[in-house]
Image (cartoon, rainbow, N blue to C red):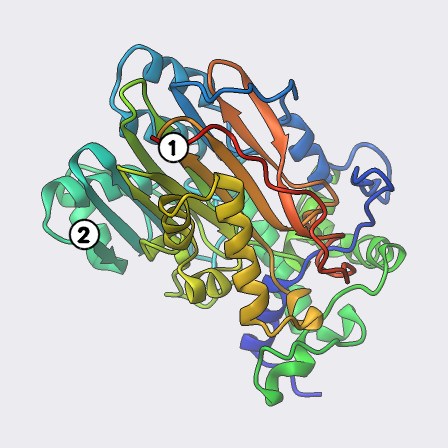
Amino acid sequence: MNFTRRDFLSTAAMSSASVALGPRGNAQTVPPAQGPQHNHPSDEHAAHDHPKPTRPAVPRLPAMICRMTGTIGIDSAYDLLRRGSDTLDAALHVTKTQEDDPNDSSAGLGGLPNEDCEVQLDACCLHGPTRRGAALGGVGGIRNASLLARAVMERTGYSLLVGSDAERFGLAQGFSKEELITERTRQTWTVWKQIRSDPGLLGAPIYDPSWPEPERKAHFLAPSQKDLDQLVHRLEPLAVKAGLTPQWTWRAVYDALFPAAEPLYVSCVNQKKEISSASTTSGLPWRMAGVAGDVTVIGAGCYLDPEVGSAGASGNAAANIKIAGARTIVENMRNGMSPEEAGMDALRRIVHWYGNDMTALRFVEMVYYILRKDGAYGGVSLWHGDRTGHVRRFAIHDGLRRSEDCLFLLEGNPPNGVQTVTGNQPMRHGDPD
């Protein structure tokens, strides 16, 4: 079997670890193969979990929504909203804290690199009160890409700036250039590089019908949880060889095998019903240099209408761009759908785009974060579980910070889910103005 660089990149990017969901929908997390000293991906998820009180019957303002594992700065950001700060300032406060955190491998400093071991960042921001927005793609050397996106919005007349020219603009605006890759993320890249050099380590291929015939045989998924555990355990010596300590070896192999783009999308609305949003990401790990995700496409990865609300995404960029997901959701709300109804409709459009082909959909993950201008909100996901074996959740703060389960369309996790029956139903949460 011929195995090209593009083969492995495209395959691993869309793959997810197979973890069965329990009978009540609670994800069964995977125990570390060599004991509790390992930093399994589930540990990171648990560290950001929040209380889960009952959702209030009436929407509350101010309100903000984001990815559950992106909430280091959410309390202080909410305080900014409560004290009357601009909604975009509050959203960017959250994105900046994640970009500054070297242990967050999804954005900014310490983001996982591309195939050339370079960290390239995408970001966007949208300011409802002034109806302005801008995006960046493939920017290196400037950790706070979300703040740079605001500079593009405020100081140019353009909506998208990319690559080295975006970096040059940032330096001219006073941003500092620095090395964004950390020693740990460089070592993780080394693990991926070693696995890529010997594709036989991964086992037998499966077929993704969404790719052209010559490339289909380069897609891999562990056929069962037991096989996944054994595969990660077998490859951990590669992480040790790369210099990683025991607490990081499991995580490094996991990210090398099953990379996923998880942009941090944040949306905020204040008491005056002014709404803004921002998104930041280091993109899909190990991707070809220069590839930008849906964050750079305003209307796909993020969108807002100040008269309606906002929506943003994380997951498979190609699937989301095809349906202009964020704009589709906002337009659905304009037409009277609740946030959850609007998001579930977008997910059904993705399924329809793939011809209801469950084999193809095993390679697709998608989560939408939705906030209406009156404070009504929702989080929806294509699959019930995520790649680390947890039920998909999102974070909401409307005076009480908490996490809530996403509404989902397909039961199970991407590698093993086979049902297209909606597992839970959208709720109507207040009526729009």
Q: Quadrant of residue 403?
A: top right
Q: Which one is nearer the viewer's eye here, 410 or 341?
A: 341
Residue 3 vertical position relative to residue 290 in the rendered view, above or below: below
> Which quarter of the rendering shows the N terminus?
bottom right
Could you tell whether 215 is left or right of 85 in the image? right
Could you tell whether 237 is left or right of 292 in the image? right
| Residue found at the far right of this picture | 226
In this view, the mark in front (2 or 1): 1
SS type, badge 2: helix
Residue 38, position as x, y percentages in the image:
77, 37
Tag 2: residue type? Arg
Mark sitting earlier along the chain (2/1): 2
Tag 1: residue type? Pro
Q: Residue 168 shows which numbered tag?
A: 2
Q: Is residue 101 visible?
A: no
Other-residue count near label 1 (Cα within 10 Å), few / some / many at <14 / 14–19 / ≥20: some
Q: Which one is nearer the viewer's eye here, 196 or 216?
A: 216
Q: Is residue 195 visible?
A: yes
SS type, badge 1: loop
Residue 307, position as x, y percentages in the image:
27, 37
Residue 114, position as x, y percentages in the image:
47, 60
Could you tell whether 112 is left or right of 426 in the image? left
Separation of disc 2 and disc 1 at Cα?
43 Å
Q: Which one is nearer the viewer's eye here, 245 or 196?
A: 196
The residue wearing badge 1 is 432
Could you tell whether 309 is left or right of 39 in the image? left
Residue 287 vertical position relative to residue 63 in the rendered view, above or below: below
> Which quarter of the rendering shows the C terminus?
top left
Other-residue count near label 2 (Cα within 10 Å), few / some / many at <14 / 14–19 / ≥20: some
Q: Residue 115 shows which numbered tag?
A: none
Residue 157, position as x, y percentages in the image:
10, 50
Residue under the point 65% across and 18% down: 53
